[in-house]
Amino acid sequence: MATDYQYYFSKIPTCPHCHKKMSCCEAPPIHIGDGLGWGAEVLYICLNDDCSLFVNGWDQIEQQFGHKSSYRYMELPDSKESNVMMVGTADAYKGSVIELDTVQAQNKRYLEEKKAVALLGSCVEEKNLAPVMYLIQDEAADISSRKKAAALLLALNDLSCIDPIRNHTFRDTSLETECNMAIKQLLKVNFKKECPYCMELVKAQATTCMFCKKDL
Ligand SMILES: [Zn+2]
Ligand SMILES: [Zn+2]
């Protein structure tokens, strides 16, 4: 994870116009006007609709430029420079506000992923399926780590991996294929098969399912 949002949140400034706490927003990819980047991942913008700069901006711009826009006060992180952004509506930039809860949840997920990746090297030896299953099921985790995890399924030889994988919706079809192949091999080395009717595991040579009693 490249962006340290916690840091940006700890530095949210107060708007000098309305003295309200500003919002931490995702920086738009392009610096409107000169075509360059902002040089920052986030922008602090005062999105208070009662802010005097915003309230008075409509008339100012109307008189000066003759069009319907106003200003929002903006600061770049780690900069004391004062900036304004022109906005056409009161809702502009409100969709790019970064919520602390979301960031904390992302951080938590990222740390879990890192922990699971660190355990991959020793999990077979320790017969620890948990980090492997965590990575396989975390759709936000790095795909190469998830594939590394899937490659350990056979060596772990733990049939309890089958149900969660069967119940997981994979966005990456190649990872899903790798997991399915691993399950196929896993069943083979354990002389098992899945009942096509109830999906319970039965002996490979069974002719009747011991769970649903259907003929196989
Ligand atoms: Zn303000
Ligand atoms: Zn069955």
Image (cartoon, rainbow, N blue to C red):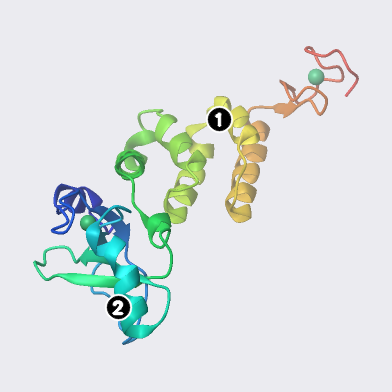
Dot 1: within a 10 Å radius of its alpha carbon, few (fewer than 14), some, or many (20 or more) residues? some
As drawn, 137 above or below 86: above
Asked whether residue 42 appears in the rendered view, the answer is: no
Work out how far the residue at label 1 is from the one at label 2, CA to CA, in angstroms. Answer: 46 Å
Residue 28: x, y in percent? Answer: 36, 69
Number of numbered discs overlaid on the protein picture: 2
Residue 209: x, y in percent? Answer: 82, 17
Q: Which residue is farthest bottom?
A: 34
Kindly state the secondary structure of the residue where label 2 is placed. loop
Q: Which residue is mark 1?
A: 161
Q: Amino acid at mark 1?
A: Cys
Which label sits in the foreground, 1 or 2? 2
Task: Give the label on residue 37, or none.
Answer: 2
46 or 143, which lies in front? Answer: 46
As drawn, 146 above or below 197: below
122 horizontally vs 149: left or right: left
Residue appearing at x 48%, y 35% in the figure: 133
Residue 162's image quarter? top right
Q: Is the C-beta of the residue carrying label 2 under 8 Å from the nearest atom of ligand 1?
A: no
Q: Quadrant of the C terminus?
A: top right
174 horizontally vs 130: left or right: right
Residue 2's image quarter? bottom left
Q: Which residue is farthest left?
A: 80
Dot 2: within a 10 Å radius of its alpha carbon, few (fewer than 14), some, or many (20 or more) residues? few
Residue appearing at x 87%, y 20% in the figure: 207
